[in-house]
Image: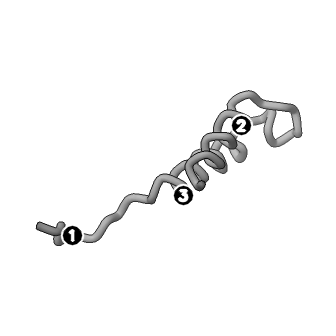
Amino acid sequence: MAPTRPRTGFPPPERAYLAYLGHTLACDACRTGVPCANAVRLGRTWKKVRR
C-alpha cells in the first residue's frame, strides 16, 4: 500500500548538503577560512551520499 500523504523530508543527498551548508554558515572557523575538521567530515559525507 502506498502512502497517501506527500513526503516532506529531503532525500539523503540534500539533507547532507544542508547539514554541510548550515555548518559552514554558522562556524566561525569556516567563515574566516581556517581549516575545520567538522566541515571536512560533512563535506566528505555529502560527496559520498550523492554518488
Give me the residue at 72% from left, 44% from top: 24
Residue type for callout 3: Glu
Give me the residue at 67% from left, 33% from top: 41
- Name the residue carrying label 1: 5
| Image-quadrant location for residue 32 | top right
Q: Position of residue 40 (x, y in %)?
A: 73, 35
| Image-quadrant location for residue 14 | bottom right
Q: Residue furthest top?
A: 37
Residue type for callout 2: Ala
Which image quarter holds the N terminus?
A: bottom left
**Marks 2 and 1 in Cβ contact (< 8 Å):** no
- Above or below residue 21? Residue 39 is above
- Name the residue carrying label 3: 14
State left or right for residue 19 relative to residue 30. left
- Name the residue carrying label 2: 39
Which image quarter holds the C terminus?
A: bottom right
Q: Residue furthest right?
A: 33
| Image-quadrant location for residue 9 | bottom left
**Marks 2 and 3 in Cβ contact (< 8 Å):** no
Give me the residue at 79% from left, 38% from top: 30
Q: How far apart are the alpha carbons under marks 2 and 3?
A: 16 Å
Q: Residue furthest left?
A: 1
Give me the residue at 18% from left, 67% from top: 3
